[in-house]
Image: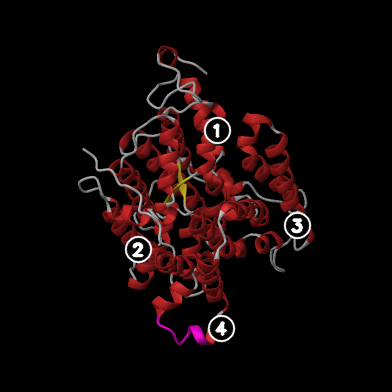
Amino acid sequence: MQTSDAVAAKPRGMFDVGVHDKLPFGELLLLGFQNIFGMAGIFVFPGLLGRSFHLPPEKIAYLYGMTFVTSGVATCLQSVGLLRMPIVQGPYFGTFIAILIMGHTLGIGLGTAYGSLFVACLIWAVFAVPVRGYSIIGLFGRFFQSSMISGLMVLLISFQIASVSLPNWLGVRATPGFPFINLFGGFVAVTVFVVVTLFGGRWLRRGAILLGLIAGTLAYTAFVPTSFTPVVTAPWLVVPQAFPFGFGVQPEAVLLFVLVMVPCSITCMPLYQAVASWMDEPMPPSRMAEGCFGAAVGSIFGAVVGSFAMNIYPDNIGMLRTTRVASRYATLSAGVLLVVLGCFSKFDMLLVLVPLVVLGGIATILFGIVMVHGIHLIGDVEWDDRNLIIAGSALMIGLGGLFISPDVMDHLPLVVQLILKQSAVTGGITMLILDPLLNKRKKPEISKTT
């Protein structure tokens, strides 16, 4: 996949096309769609969130649309604005879980949840602003360079997110397909996803999630008829709205969102550094902070229009190695396509027709893969007494909060309830306190930007 610019340039090792090289329109279009198909959360999180709050179909379609649009805006910003690297941004499942907890466990409405997320994103954007080559967020970065801490954070989040995987696949007694048709629809989706992923080849497997959702939906609707009238009657375009669910701010919720976004932003930094090292691109602290700031700006936009905070997607980084194309204009094309698809209301409504049980089946596999990734990260940890104490305390405190009885919870301050229901937050805080106390590591050198 060579262009005149790429051929004239010096070979870049593992890449045929460099970061700043441009590509023909047809190749940009193909690579753009390929990047979209690799974004698992964008096809799953809006549907799960909307159905969990019993939103009407048009509101769920709006959630899908704004998630696409927000991801597109953030990706464009990273590609040609701030970071200037081939980075794709998508919905962060930490905020997805936080909104679910606030709505279902603590009774906070979507308006207050999104208003609080907006304030938290503003705070995090300030943390990410580089001043003389440094940023507040950079001070946290060294903690998350530890494989043990990063891996345990993934595990803690995975344990909590399991509540929306298999239970949604099985469904409830009130659903028309309970239980066997539900299980069958999800099974078909999972089977197609797994088969295409393992045997579909380099290009086809990038659309494995979408193909699985389509196959599972067709299998389910063969037994439980589905009307396509909402797609026909839906308007062609959807316009972003400012705080479509209302606006409210609760200080405790703001604090929770800030704590949830700490691992989101910080775990991006090693990935920025890895991509830069592949391409011999400089990645000083100021540029890394600009990347985190770009994600924060995208998250602010998402909170305003009713989407999610933005996170880097490792699958799309993997595509760089697979395609040997590192051009940031390829990810820019993905961002533009995301905005176009998000504004196309009929496409959004088609995604709404995917049954919750099918989303649950796909989510079961995807979240399981994420969990195993966390286990892989801690596989090389030297489990001495210090690390056993740190990890064991974090896991027990993080998971223990999920099992505190409602009677005890009702007598605790709201901020404490919010934090205890977020295992990644309580476990993460535990690690950030114990690790520097028990493990004395040499601080990494921080180079200042000229």
**Residue 34: image tag:** 1
- Pointer 3 residue: 183
Tell me: 277 left or right of 399. left
N-term mark: 3 or 1: 1
What secondary structure is found at the residue carrying circle 3?
A: helix
What secondary structure is found at the residue carrying circle 1?
A: helix
Please state which amino acid type lies under the numbered disc 1: Gln
- Pointer 2 residue: 115
Cα distance in 3D space between marks 4 and 1: 46 Å
Please state which amino acid type lies under the numbered disc 2: Gly
Please state which amino acid type lies under the numbered disc 3: Leu
Cα distance in 3D space between marks 3 and 4: 31 Å
Question: Which numbered disc, 2 or 4, marks the residue closer to the eye?
Answer: 4
Q: Closer to the camera, 217 or 332?
A: 332
- Pointer 4 residue: 405
Q: Examine the rendered structure and indicate whether residue 45 appears above or below residue 450.
A: below
Cα distance in 3D space between marks 1 and 2: 33 Å
